[in-house]
Amino acid sequence: MIFTALPVEYEKVERHLTAAGATRSGPDERDGGTRAAVYELSGRVPWRVYLAKTGTGNTTTATAVSSWLAKVQPEAAFFVGIAAGRKDALPRDVVIAETVYEYQRGKQSEQGFHARPRSWEPSGEILGTAEQVAQDLAPLLTGRIHVKPIASGDTVIDSPYAPEHGIIRTHYEDTAAIETEGAGFARAVQSRASTGLKWLLIRGISDLADGDKKGLEAAGGQQDAALNAAHVAVRVLLALDVEPSAPPARTAATLSLRMPRKPGRPPAPPRVPRRRAVSGARRRRLLWGVPLVATATVIAVVAVQSCGSGDSTADDDHVPAASLASCGEADIFLRIAASVDKSESLRRAAKAYGPRRSGSACVEVVVHDKNSGEAMRALARGWEEDDGPRPDVWSPAGGAWLSLARTNATGKNKGLFPERAEPIVTSPLTVAVPRPMAEVLEWPENGFSWSELADWSRNAKGFWGRKDRGKPGWGDFTLGKTNPEYSTSGLNATIGAFYAATGTSGELSKGRLDDAGNREFVKDIEQSAVHYGDTTLTFTANLRRADEEHEDKAMSYISAVTLEESTVAAYNAGHPCGALSDEEGCEKTTKPQTPLVSFYPEDGILFSDHPYIKLNGRGEAKEAVADDFLAYLHSPEIFARHFAPYGFRTHEGTAPKNSPVLNKAHGVLPGTPLDPLSTPEDDVLKHLLDIWPVLRRPANVLLVIDTSASMNDEIVSAGESKLQRLKRAETELFGEFTRSDKVGLWKFSDAEDLGGGTDYRELVPVGPYDQPRSKQLSDNFRALEAEGATGLYDTLDAATKAMRKDYDPSAINAIVLLTDGRNEDRNSLTELELVQHIEDPSEPVVRVFTIAYGSEADDRDRKGRSVLQRIADAGGGQAYEAHDVETIEKVITSVISNF
């Protein structure tokens, strides 16, 4: 059946059913006060569809749905309607619920609202079908399709000041839609989960719960939202498949619901049709679907086979149950520190897994983001409070970090690490190139090697304008590569380059790393780096911003970047940061105008094996849950739902067949024969990182520090000022530079307080980072004092001009700007003028990396993008935030990793 509450939803579902060829069949059926129209729908599978109107509200919905479920005993249920959108879900968009939150469930006290979360998730099979339909439908709808959580309560919200917004922001921030029936529906269908019932909640966005509901209704907002939602619902129904069954008597048939086979699963064995009687219990098993309603309820599509014969046994397709029993409120947490390329996938899998009983303990899995290199250092030296929650399981992007942790560990920390760990998923390292450039290089027919990459880097000047390429507007050959001290792709790329230099695929030794010719080979590759970074999202985010400005601008930013295959596939699928993420700027959006494509170096590839490292000393309860959760992650259904859509290969290293993104359309060639390279021994890896600073491209960096009066503001929790707190990060600010780098230091506030005609003062000119300059930088940094206003725009404009005057074409030329405020000089040039100066195409590129320091720094404007973000975009750098001043060391470490 399909339940709707409002006439507009009923009409749109009926319209799409009729458009799909459905015809009315017999009289309406009743259940209590609810009437259902019956339709016959032909197609690959003949369906019987029930369409009913119930009423609004979670309680009414739960009662009506429960009654119909008991009466019809369906195999699947859809709930379809309209809703209010939030975040990036806009009117005319459609949201398919991957989670349904009951957001008003909690306790209100004098201290505020205390959430007692309750949520439900549809099965992986039916959600996978819906996701595929969403991908196919995207070009046909007037809005976008999101697969995100939906929050359900008992209040219709139509004000930006409604207290419900605060509850959702605080406790259910990933919510994309708000409505009033989904929780009742989810409660009803979940009560029949043991029967294998599959369900889906779909919502069309009619308004934004911001006080403009009537205006949008007058403009046809409800009509458009209901129409799009109904379109998605009917298309999902048509995408479902069933095995042939015996003819139904009147309303029933035995259906074997078979979802499209998930990536990584072997095909089901062929069924042998047999004619046989159908038992009464099985005849009553129907398929339900539900139209999307925000304040309406549509229950279910009931599908029946109207003719034919065959096996009536249901498939065993289901999301696997964990071995351990579920439990209520957790009293122990199993914490996982995971690399950001898969942390959100793990977080969603952990939510579906839920708390589990281990002995007398109830254990809940909690996932935290942690950069691979940063986590390795924290674990090796002894995890500190500032490092975040101490993990029980560590999952970096590559197993090389386990080797480095064992080598670098001191004292009792050496006992933390096991000898080996199983992968969660895998992905090979590739060299990603914007598609137009790749086609000039004759992708996909031709590939290239690390050796050719080194040759292109040696001869980067005018690379694209040569006769055989004919694209002078693309300029020089430039490479994006992450810092191997922090990032797995950067570490694997450096290892791969050394293997190529030695002409081997194994047994890399310290001697070979120290060979002058091998070092020169690797250094050649590094010299074309535009800049480095602690994660690949630095490059994918910059690529996406360039792509949004103009379809050809991505080529002006970078020629090639070393990325995992999964990152390329996810980026091309519309994930700007190359992975599933709800972080600001990383939410899924449209596909890029200029996609990336992957080259697989012919002289060897390393895999990111995403190990699941169970740290020693967890205790029996956590040990059991850790083992059980890994088995859960390895199941084909969980892989298909949480990892395959984002480009990962299985934990066994195989590319799943029929993957939604691992294909040529998404820029990857999973069938390419690969020559795997082995990970070097522990001490060799450590030596590689020790020598990398002398191989990397040198930096030419000006540090510009805000010393306005607001830097004297006290940090109450620390008993010191913001400037004093910043000075404690001196090691992170200067400690990574080497003698091959050039570094300078400016401070800025306003001209009057600095006693001159400018808002800035040069403290240490940019020059070689030798011992005298190192001491000079340190002394001046420690002596900084705060006074005056913030003359940001004129300062940055002057810094850009100074860096261009002393531009070093062999180095990464950059400015690092730290401020705790915004421009306060009314006589300065404007933001627009500053941005135009920074991105002037006639001038050499000086990359700008900004740090917003403190909670008052860089207030956001109406467009939602900060001034510092726009400045960094113009400079081809990256904007960083240290709104919590206690994180300043970590943020500065991330910034300096670009050099």
Image (cartoon, rainbow, N blue to C red):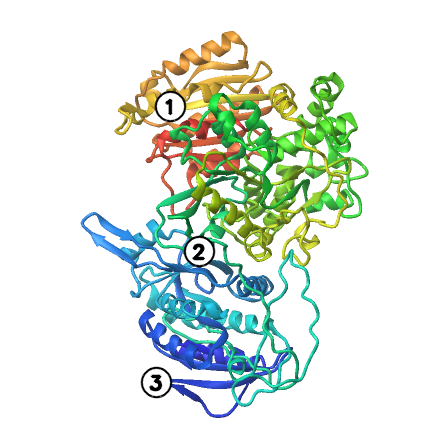
For image coordinates 43% across by 63% down, the residue present is: 91
Q: Amino acid at mark 1?
A: Leu
Q: Residues within 10 Å of mark 1 (few under 14, many from 20)?
A: many
How far is disc 1 from disc 3 in space, using C-alphas? 68 Å
Q: Residues within 10 Å of mark 2 (few under 14, many from 20)?
A: few
Q: Name the one closer to the observer, 627 or 196.
A: 627
Res. 561 in view:
yes
Q: Residues within 10 Å of mark 3 (few under 14, many from 20)?
A: few
Residue lying farthest to the bottom in this orientation? 27
For image coordinates 52% across by 78% down, the residue present is: 286
Q: Please, is residue 663 above or below residue 12 in the view?
A: above
Q: Name the one closer to the observer, 188 or 450.
A: 188
Would you name the residue on which mark 1 appears?
726
Which numbered disc, 1 or 3, marks the residue closer to the eye? 3
Would you name the residue on which mark 3 appears?
33
Are the residues flagged by discs 1 and 3 in contact, CB closer than 8 Å? no
Would you name the residue on which mark 2 appears?
325
Label 1 or label 2, whichever comes before in sequence order: 2
Q: Tag 2's secondary structure?
A: loop
Q: Tag 1's secondary structure?
A: helix
Q: Amino acid at mark 2?
A: Ala
Q: Name the one closer to the observer, 467 or 135.
A: 135
Res. 827 in view:
no
